[in-house]
Image: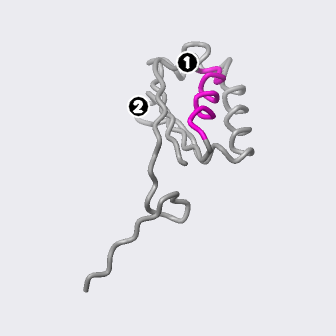
Amino acid sequence: MHYLLTYDYVTDILERRGPYRSEHLRLAWEANEQGTLVLAGALADPVDGAVFIFDCEAESQVREFASNDPYVKHGLVTQWKVRPWTTVVGKEAKTPVFPSCSE
């Protein structure tokens, strides 16, 4: 199943992330190497949040990732949310749906 993890950041995230950024990125890259985190990054203009795409067995894996993230632990994330994502288009879609041919 695909899952989306979204973060809302504090307004001064760019100024405050320094001491935690390396550990935050290490956690993300480890999850990527394990095959559970597909893609992740901050939203831009403004930098007020982030989006993570997970491909894993259980929502609990995504929640565990967020709970261990230093950005969350140190209050740089004001709110986070996990949502199951029903992917239907693309090579990596978990539940592909194709258009019907009614010509």
Residue at position x 66%, y 23% in the image: 68
- The amino acid sitting under disc 1 is Glu
Percent position (x, y) of residue 41? 55, 39
Give the secondary structure at mark 2: loop
- Using residue 26 as the reference point, say whether residue 82 is left or right of it: left
Extent of the magenta region:
58-71
Q: Nearer the viewer, residue 6 or 83?
A: 83
Q: Which mark is residue 46?
A: 2
Residue at position x 41%, y 31% in the image: 46
- Considering only vertical position in the picture, is 52 above or below 2? above
- Considering only vertical position in the picture, is 31 above or below 67? below
> How far apart are the alpha carbons under marks 1 and 2?
14 Å
Q: Nearer the viewer, residue 86 or 27?
A: 86
Residue at position x 54%, y 44% in the image: 53
- Considering only vertical position in the picture, is 82 above or below 71? below
- The amino acid sitting under disc 2 is Pro
Find the residue positioned furthest to the bottom: 103
Q: Nearer the viewer, residue 84 or 39?
A: 84
Q: Quadrant of the C terminus?
A: bottom left
Percent position (x, y) of residue 64? 63, 27
Q: Which residue is mark 1?
A: 15
Image quadrant where residue 59 sits: top right
Find the residue positioned furthest to the left: 103
